[in-house]
Amino acid sequence: MGPRKVEEATGVPQRTQRRIVHEEIPFGMTDQQLHKKHRVGRPPALAQELRCVVDALLAEDPRIKTVEVLRRLRSEHGYAAGKNPVYDYVKEARPPRAELPVVRFEGVAGEFGQFDFGKLTVPYLDGTSETLIFFAARLKYSRMIHVCLVEGESTEALIRGMESAARAFQGLALINVIDNTKAGVIKRVRHPETGKETIHYQEQFGYFLQEMNILCEPAHPYSGNQKGAVENLVRFVKESFLMARRFQNRADLLRQLAEWQRQVNEERPCEATREIPAQRWAAELPRLRPLPLEEEGYGILYHAVVGRDAFVTCKGYRYSTPATWIGQPVFVRVHPTTVVLHYSGERVTHPRIPSNGRYSLLPEHRAALMVKPRGAVMAQRQILMDLCPAAEDFFTELVHRRPKTWREQDLPIAWELFEQQGEARMQEAFAWCVRREAIGGEYLRAWAEGVAR
């Protein structure tokens, strides 16, 4: 077959055909041998002079990052090849890190406590499942354990978990070990000369430690073994309780959780100490530090400034204040169910979650909004409309049906009933009127008197 027909059949040009004919055919050679002979691919190793440079860098700083070695070779020594030879040689030449033995130790009574967050998806027997986040606490000396469910791994969850543990243990240990989580630790800064490390706590968590007069020791990153002889707390809760039992629903899980904690604390000897935790806890109790907790729970501290509308905004909600507080800085204490505002020796208490889902306006703070006549009308209407979606639908229809009379006739009736009946009853009244398209103050009064029901 001639060159032209070969080109037509294979697409290989005639010139290439002639070059191939005159090339030496490497019979009996493997691919690796062929690549090595013709220097195909990346160089397999660094040149000797570059190896000396890498050795010097490793001698100066054995933990230097490989990417930094590569950067210096390229910028300072003209290295132009790929990264693999550098990475391979650094891996080979870097001195091995000495493996130190894990130090196990026991704390004295009241010295250490351990706290951890855990997360696990639990299937229920009713066919549903739930991803649970729990907070676990344990006293190192007695091995007393306390577990509670929390909403997330936030700073408040950390504080509420430690507060719950303090109530269960009747105090906390001298040093409380937590994970290096953003809920408690913002950053760690090591002094370049002294090597001393400074820990910057999350602001609200720092206030909690200071006000409760307790010490905290965050575990060093990637050093879980420093928690000593205390077993892996999260794994213990998962394997001994959550994964070992079956639950009908969340209520059944909470019931069994209380039963399980009673068993591990008061009935079953701990494998580490060979004693029942409650017995050792009796000896540890005098060394624990009771927290000065209020009956309504610890108030997480925030700072705020009262706005021109006499409201304070905190954690997504607005809370009313006396008009004399406008423009002043206040302390906001967020308790589990309430929010307390503090200023100049005075305090104002609100429900933590407003009934309308947006803001809480106390009755004693409404009068300041009613000073100007037109402002009073619009303020009253807005307050009523914010009670529920049905109230907004009621006033939308009312304004368009009675544009000239709703201010003087219907709004005063609705406001009077609101002050008499309260928020919950008025929500029912507005919902009843909207469902029946009975729009007007007379219908609200009829509902309140029981005539229309």
Image (cartoon, rainbow, N blue to C red):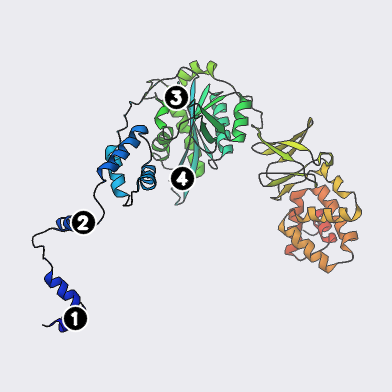
Label 1 is placed on what type of residue? Glu
Q: Residue at x 53, y 17 (%)?
A: 287
Residue at numbered disc 2: 39
Q: Secondary structure at mark 3?
A: loop
Give the spatial CA distance, label 1 vs label 3. 84 Å
Which numbered tag is attached to residue 143?
A: 3
Q: Residues within 10 Å of mark 4 (few under 14, many from 20)?
A: few
Q: Residue furthest left?
A: 28
Please, what secondary structure does the residue beneath circle 2 have? loop
Occupied quadrant, residue 167: top right
Is 9 left or right of 50, judged from the image as shown?
Answer: left
User: Earlier along the polypeptide chain: callout 1 or callout 4?
Assistant: 1
- Name the residue beneath numbered marker 4: 248
Q: Which mark is residue 7?
A: 1
Under tag 4, what secondary structure?
loop
Distance of label 1 from label 4 (alpha carbons):
77 Å
